[in-house]
Amino acid sequence: MPVSLRACLIALLYCASAAPALAASADETSRLTLVLQQLANIETLAREAEAGASTAAGERYFFDYPRLHQDLQRMRSGVQDYLAPSRAQPRDPAELSGAYRTEVAP
């Protein structure tokens, strides 16, 4: 995974986990909107990388793009739910996978 993509993911995860329960200011809302834009940029980069990925027969490991896309969608949904909550309810405590290297079955 390129260093810049990894750094963006780490920064986005930090921003998403550090947000308080309610949006307190317009500044926070604008920053979270920026987070959503950055998630869309990361999704675009990931799709381009996936399209250009080689799947040579001799490779033992490959990058698990579907899992990355699921985690990005989960982050996007979390930020959107925070910005526009339907009602007060408990958060889903499920964690992101974070492991994107998968071994090819023999």
Image: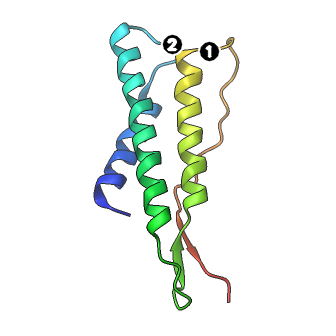
- Dividing the picture into quadrants, the one containing residue 32 is top left
Q: Nearer the viewer, residue 6 or 34?
A: 34
Where is residue 67? Give x, y as percent: 60, 56
Q: Is residue 43 above or below residue 98?
A: above
User: Earlier along the polypeptide chain: callout 1 or callout 2?
Assistant: 2
Q: Which mark is residue 106?
A: none
Mark 1 vs mark 2, foreground winner is 1
- Residue sticking out furthest to the top: 25
- The residue located at (34%, 46%) in the rendering is 8
- One can see residue 43 in this view: yes
Q: Position of residue 42 (x, y in %)?
A: 41, 46
- Expressed as whole percent of the image width and height from the top left, the position of residue 49 reads 43, 62
In the displayed structure image, the side of residue 46 where residue 64 appears, left or right: right
Locate the N terminus by quadrant.
bottom left
Q: Amino acid at mark 2?
A: Leu
Task: Tell me what residue is drawn at x 35 percent, y 41 percent.
Answer: 11
Tell me the residue at 59%/22% (across/down). Answer: 81
Q: Position of residue 13 (x, y in %)?
A: 43, 40
- Quadrant where the C terminus sits is bottom right
Residue placed under numbered mark 2 in the picture = 22
The amino acid type found where label 1 is placed reads: Pro
Residue under numbered circle 1? 85
Q: How many marks?
A: 2
The residue drawn where x is 60% and y is 45% is 95
**Classed neighbour count for the residue bearing mark 1: other residues with Cα under 10 Å, few (<14), some (14–19), many (≥20):** few
**Is disc 1 placed on a helix, strand or loop?**
loop
Instruction: Give the Cα distance between marks 1 and 2.
Output: 9 Å
